[in-house]
Image (cartoon, helix red, strand yellow):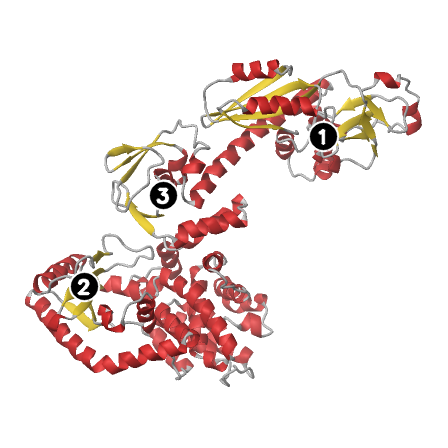
Amino acid sequence: MSKDKTHTIEQLLKKARGYIEDEVDIKKIEKAYNFAEKKHRGQFRKNGDPFIVHPIEVAVILTTVYADSSTIAAGLLHDVLEDTDTTREELEEEFGPEITKLVYGVTKLGQLNFSCENEYLIEYYKKIVVGMSEDVRVIIIKLAERLHNMRTLFALPEERQKLVAKETLEILAPIAHHLGIHKIKSELEDLSLRYLKPDVFYDIAEKLNNTKLERDNTVNEMLTSVSNLLTEHHIPHEIKGRAKSIYSIYNKLDKGKKFSDIYDLLALRIIVETEQECYVALGLIHSKYRPYPKRFKDYIAMPKANMYQSLHTTVFGVDGYLFEIQIRTHAMDEVAENGIASHWAYKEHKNANEVLKNSTEQKLQFFKAIIDSNNDKMSSEEVIDSIKDEVLDSSIYVFTPKGDVFELPKGATPIDFAYKVHTQVGDTMVGAIVNNNIVPLDYTLQNNDIVKINTNKNSKGPSQEWLKIARCAQTKNKIRAFFTKSEKEINLERGKEALEKELRKRKIAFNDFDTDENKDILFKELKVDSLEEIELNIGNGKFQASTVLNLLERKEEPSTDKIKKITIKEEDADILVAGIDKVKVNLAACCNPIPQDEIIGYITKGNGITVHRSNCHNLALLENRTVAVKWNSEVHKRYVTTIIIETDTSKNNLLEIMQHTSMQDAPSDRVVTINKSGNAIYELDLYVRSVDHLNKVIQDLKKLRYITKVERIIR
């Protein structure tokens, strides 16, 4: 609860020496204090305390979770960048990059404006907090800072108190829980409830106080009985009564329970030496006290996502009272209470930062699932759906045949499991076996399932259909990433072929084209960094090979007067150029305009006018030398256009597709078949009379049951 007492630097150093042995580390903390005290001198907090009190209290809180010396130093310095004239360069010169990075990380978090309007945004902001922190120690400092601010929240106006308390309860306390820092999490929750619902808080506190004597007597009697039982069987142990937090009692009351029905107000925690002794102690307790049905939980065999481990049971104890009992080892208790910065890192003389990174990798997966989706450019609706599905729903725990446990959301499939194990496992997956039975890929996994994934290194990769089966947003992102990579390779090859074809057409050797001078011109004009990027953009239709090569031509630009001298009868032309009687006209191969398309002309250097569709993206790359053009009212020729046909089968249906286009009087002279993960995709060049004619062909093709998509493309 709230602490009025403040600490001195001497008291802080004494607490740090309790687990930090190296005097160099202690000197680092002392130096940070001296720097902060000087920078904050003359500043005061809203409650009247000198400002330096706040960083000292933050550092003291950090010692309670056995934070390393760099974290404590950063805790002392965490406000100097924001509230003093200290620069990042000055801080790095004094304390080095590690501490500076921690202080800067906390400063960035302090600039976040949280919103607690609905549960989805709350979960999203939790992820932002973690995503902004490359080093998890930044989060620990932020939690310690918030805890001290909550202890002194009385100094703020009531409206501000409630806003801070709500943000703490709904964003920061759950992060403390998922990092396993129980002591900070519990105090944050209780303090938040005190300001959000003071009547409820003090009512529960009063009831606890009124029943304290009776509860203490009952707990002491049960404690003695259980301790004697373990001693008789030679099990070294510690045993203590466990206080129930006011917020956890409030949660049970809020769900409709009566105060008298909250049986785990009476609770014991037993700490033994080994994991084996946990189970022996459990058996002895159950042999003497009848267990309450369905209240046993084994978090040792199946740890929680935050690596919490303990045995939980509820038994009928002395005088028939129900007791909740937790049994764990000293190491398990250390992690449960203090979280990831437990002092065993120092006892084993390991690098604290490395220990933190290794031990939190799994814990932070909870928060990083949605962050990883940023590269996929998910819409806000998709983000909220994925948060709702993966964060707010309950989880299941499934196992590999070797016994490794993985946490997945309810409704997850073998596909989700495969990608959770490793991206390569997912990409090469060909089947799944659950509990020794072959299952389909859309099988819904259940709690405690044992899953084996069959892979084949020659697999062509995931299927587009998997996107409909997968449950996790992260799984879908990885599947999409596979297709993005595949499409890139296809487009790169296609662009390379198109460029080489255009070079052959112009009788230009590749070596003559691939010069530093030419590349400098193209990179500047096209705003790219490499020849590969040009080829890729030609392949995906952003650039046209002819447009790229035209940029290198240095021919004299013909004037409008010269163009007008060309004489061709107007009635013979399919395309009419405004203000010009006759001119050489070419259709742009990048967008392949056809009759009824809106079009525009571009005056080229020495090659007449090239006609583009009005919405062709290549027009943005061209200089402002356009001229109005339009289709003749009567066009008798056919014009080529390109369509992409996607199917849901690997079966070759090209013959039937060609028959349908021929029946619609739209012959094809080029077909490219792309087998993508079992779903055939075809690219066809069709000769059509108009946009209406093309739309009729497309609608006819869509009637074929295996065709999922048909669209016209622009190169």
Q: Mark 3 points at which residue?
A: 412
Q: Which of marks 1 and 2 is nearer the N terminus?
A: 2
Q: Which amino acid does label 1 sit on?
A: Val
Mark 1 neighbour density, 10 Å: few (under 14) some (14–19) many (20 or more): some
Mark 3 neighbour density, 10 Å: few (under 14) some (14–19) many (20 or more): many
Q: What residue type is labelled 3?
A: Ala
Q: Quadrant location of the C terminus?
A: top right
Q: Is there any visible trace of residue 70 in the rendered image?
A: no
User: Of 541 and 158, which appears nearest the observer?
Assistant: 158
Q: In this view, does 348 lie above or below 690?
A: below
SS at mark 2 in the image: strand
Q: Which amino acid does label 2 sit on?
A: Thr
Between the residue at mark 1 and the residue at mark 2, the CA separation in whole angstroms equals 76 Å
Q: Name the image quarter holding residue 1.
A: bottom left
Q: Name the residue under label 1.
A: 548
Between the residue at mark 3 and the residue at mark 1, the CA separation in whole angstroms equals 48 Å
Q: Is residue 529 above or below residue 278?
A: above
Give me the disc on residue 95. none
Q: Name the image quarter holding residue 603.
A: top right
Between the residue at mark 3 and the residue at mark 2, the CA separation in whole angstroms equals 31 Å
Q: Mark 2 points at which residue?
A: 314
User: Of 670 and 58, which appears nearest the observer?
Assistant: 670
Residue positioned most to the left: 232
Residue 75: percent from left, percent from top: 45, 71
Dot in front, 1 or 2: 2
Q: Is there any visible trace of residue 705 in the rendered image?
A: yes
Give the left or right position of residue 164, taking residue 225 as reference: right
Q: Is residue 590 above or below residue 384?
A: above
SS at mark 1 in the image: helix
